[in-house]
Image (cartoon, rainbow, N blue to C red):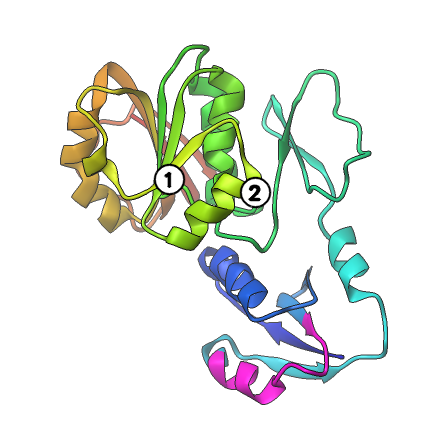
């Protein structure tokens, strides 16, 4: 057994976790200075160090320990915002507080673990903006966590889409309240959405702005995140802003 410590930027953590899962990690933990991934001795340590060289990897040999259990212990259930209670699937006996809605998270499966500030900001915006009966569109859905959260709030039709076939497969497997397809906004008919969620980088949000205008209903809501305070998209009329750890979420 060996482990590798990586030092990703905050915006890269979800992507790194998903990629390490594809590499066969036996478990992932957070620690001061980065993310540590554990591998059995059949994995090629040197290839992993070379593959992730830009993240300053540090290799360490480990004593035989149940790292999978340690990794699970590092993902406790936790409340978020006013309504949600995020729970990994292996904590099925964890009770949900009476005033909250249970939302499963699936660490390491695809981007959208519930730990990134932009994801958490979107969840807080969803509980504020999505109303019963709303039709919701999640653009770049990743793991599907935001679409599932919107479905829990609206009880109506929620659709998520992503250009990544694997991400859509994971979303479909994990979350049954929303529908998911491979593609983007051009597949959605005009004036369909009461709420559009897009947790994407600023440049992509600017490119999609005309399609947002086409797909959304009059007096509808945009929830936009995925960008830090120093790199915001242009061209949107903002009605509210929420912030966490220098990441922003705009409600438009």
Callout 2 secondary element:
loop
Around disc 1, counting alpha carbons within 10 Å, would you say few (fewer than 14), some (14 to 19), or many (20 or more)? many
Q: Quadrant of the C terminus?
A: top left
Q: Nearer the viewer, residue 235 or 194?
A: 194
Residue 79 occupies quadrant: top right
Q: Is residue 49 magenta?
A: yes
Which residues are the magenta region? 38-51
Residue 151 in the image, given as x and y percentages of width and height: 49, 23
Report how far apart the C-alphas of labels 2 and 1 lie in the structure: 14 Å
Task: Give the total of numbered labels.
Answer: 2
Q: Residues within 10 Å of mark 2 (few under 14, many from 20)?
A: many
Q: Is residue 160 left or right of residue 111?
A: left
Residue at 48%, 39% (x, y): give it: 144
Residue 245 in view of the camera: no
Q: Is residue 108 left or right of residue 2?
A: left
Compared with 151, 140 (above or below) is below
In this view, the residue in front, 35 or 178, is 178
Question: At x 82% / y 34%, what residue is drawn?
Answer: 93
Label placed on residue 3: none
Q: Quadrant of residue 103?
A: top right
> Between tags 2 and 1, which lies in front?
2
Residue at (78%, 65%) from the top-left corner?
67
Image quadrant holding the N terminus, namely: bottom right
Kindly identify which residue carries mark 1: 225
Above or below, comparing residue 52 to residue 178 in the picture:
below
Residue drawn at x 80%, y 33% as measured from the top left: 94
- Badge 2 or badge 1: first in the primary sequence: 2
Disc 2: which residue: 114
């Amino acid at each position: 057994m060996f482990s590798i410590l990586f030092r990703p930027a905050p915006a890269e953590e979800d992507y790194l976790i998903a990629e390490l899962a594809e590499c066969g990690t036996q478990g992932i933990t957070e620690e001061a200075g980065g993310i540590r991934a554990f591998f059995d001795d059949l994995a090629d340590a040197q290839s992993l160090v070379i593959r992730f060289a830009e993240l300053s990897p540090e290799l360490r040999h480990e004593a035989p320990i149940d790292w999978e259990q340690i990794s699970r212990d590092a993902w406790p259930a936790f409340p978020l915002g006013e309504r949600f209670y995020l729970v990994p699937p292996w904590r099925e006996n964890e009770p949900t507080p009476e005033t909250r809605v249970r939302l499963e998270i699936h660490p390491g499966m695809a981007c959208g673990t519930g730990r990134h500030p932009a994801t958490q900001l979107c969840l807080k915006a969803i509980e504020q903006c999505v109303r019963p009966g709303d039709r919701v569109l999640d653009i770049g859905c990743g793991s599907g966590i935001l679409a599932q959260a919107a479905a829990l709030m609206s009880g109506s039709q929620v659709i998520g889409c992503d250009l990544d076939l694997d991400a859509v497969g994971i979303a479909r497997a994990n979350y049954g309240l929303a529908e998911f397809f491979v593609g983007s906004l051009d597949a959605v008919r005009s004036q369909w959405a009461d709420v559009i969620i897009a947790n994407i980088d600023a440049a992509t949000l600017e490119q999609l702005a005309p399609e947002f205008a086409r797909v959304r209903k009059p007096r509808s809501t945009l929830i936009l995140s995925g960008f830090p305070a120093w790199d915001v998209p242009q061209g949107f009329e903002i009605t509210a802003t929420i912030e966490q750890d220098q990441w922003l979420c705009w409600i438009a």
